[in-house]
Amino acid sequence: MGNIDSTGNGLYVHVPFCTKKCSYCAFNVSHNGLHLQGDYFKALGAEVLHYLTNGPFELRGVGFDTVYFGGGTPSLVDPSLIADFLASIPLAGGAEVSIEVNPESARRELFTSYVDSGVTRVSIGVQSFDDKVLCYYGRTHDAAGAERAIELAVETEGLSVGIDLVYGSEVEDDKSWSRTVLKTASLATGISHVSAYALGIEKRTKLHYDKAKSQSEDVLAERYLMADEAFEGCGLQNYEISNWACTDGRCRHNANYWSWGDYLGVGLGAHSHFGRSRWWNDPSLKGYIAAVKTQGTGFLAGEELVDSQVEAERLMLALRIQGGLSEKELKTWVSRTESEELLGLFEIVNGRASLKPRGRLLADGVFRALSA
Ligand code: SF4
């Protein structure tokens, strides 16, 4: 592991099942494999056990500090599988356990059973409060369903509630995005976290095959700034470029990724990171289950990072989060360039540097300039 100190104790659990594929989705999902959920969860449990027994991932302390069930649609699976899985792994006291929920799965009993199993936060895939946009994304819920799901989650004692949004489709105009942003802000007394990502049209998605377009960079920038202003105005502070939260609503699991912390990823296509090592799993459902049966893990391939990769990745992530660099580190990076004006894109608070809102829009360019 060289001179890289390992930190972080996160567990990512990929749950690949979805009822149908959304038009923009490039994730590893299975829309006809739900009947294999029992076998899949057996494989997940076996894979965690294998790594804890054989490495290379090492747990520091008594258990995982954070667990994140992502997908896919984890809320589609039988909640007893989630409960049994959580009961079978070592969890640290006060662990944060998150699960992604699609609005159409939301039921009061589902949320209660999650809390009883140890889940502490849900992330609801709202995406938009405009039915026209939801239809374009191929989502299986409407805006009213999203609101109902949020209400039920917020009413569940012991659950912290976040929502996910996507902006910038060609069918969305300023009015539509403004409605989504204002509706989100109006719910901010109940929700503690919002993620908002610009639509990316990736290969092998329906939107890509349809030759769909997203909005121009300028429009995306205006939409981002509109969201930032509204969310900050209702007490949800930006802590990563695309994420806002109230003080105790930040997602510790994702914060660990952004701090270049270690995590174990289990499930098909899941990625893991420990020290300088990074590895990833077989991306097919049957291939993953078979691989765990024969070799104990879904391991497909991996790599060892060299110093220059580590430095570049740490910088890229540090630019995304609030206070990600010390003032001294920022000045050292900038002094290696001939672009002193880059400093103007940052604000310094208590010796820590963060990109200002307009600077965040240029984060990729700032990274390229600093790391050139
Ligand atoms: S619900 Fe999420 S994971 Fe499933 S197809 Fe839609 S975007 Fe992809």
Image (spheres, rainbow, N blue to C red):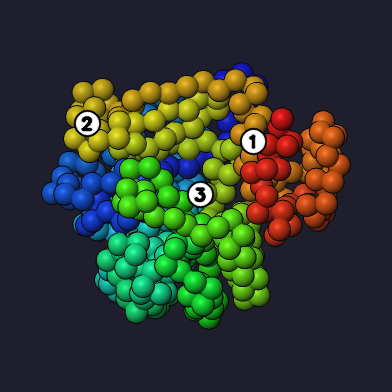
Q: Residue at the spot x=43%, y=23% of the render?
A: 302
| Mark 3 residue type | His
Q: Is mark 2 within 8 Å of ligand 1?
A: no
- Residue 156, image quadrant: bottom left
Can residue 40 be seen in the rendering of this structure? Answer: yes
Mark 3 vs mark 1: which is more N-terminal?
3
Mark 2 vs mark 1: which is more N-terminal?
2
Whether label 2 touches label 3, CB < 8 Å: no
Quickly name the residue at label 2: 287
Quickly name the residue at label 1: 314
Quickly name the residue at label 3: 253
Question: So how many labels did they put on this image?
Answer: 3
User: 196 left or right of 21?
Assistant: right
Q: Residue at the spot x=46%, y=69% of the render?
A: 172
What quarter of the picture does the C terminus occupy?
A: top right
User: 9 left or right of 265?
Assistant: right
Q: Residue at the spot x=22%, y=42% of the render?
A: 40
Can residue 159 be seen in the rendering of this structure? Answer: no
Count neighbours of disc 3 (C-alpha within 10 A) and say few if under 14, some if 14 to 19, many if 20 or more. many
Label 3 or label 1, whichever lies nearer to me, is 1
| Mark 2 residue type | Gly
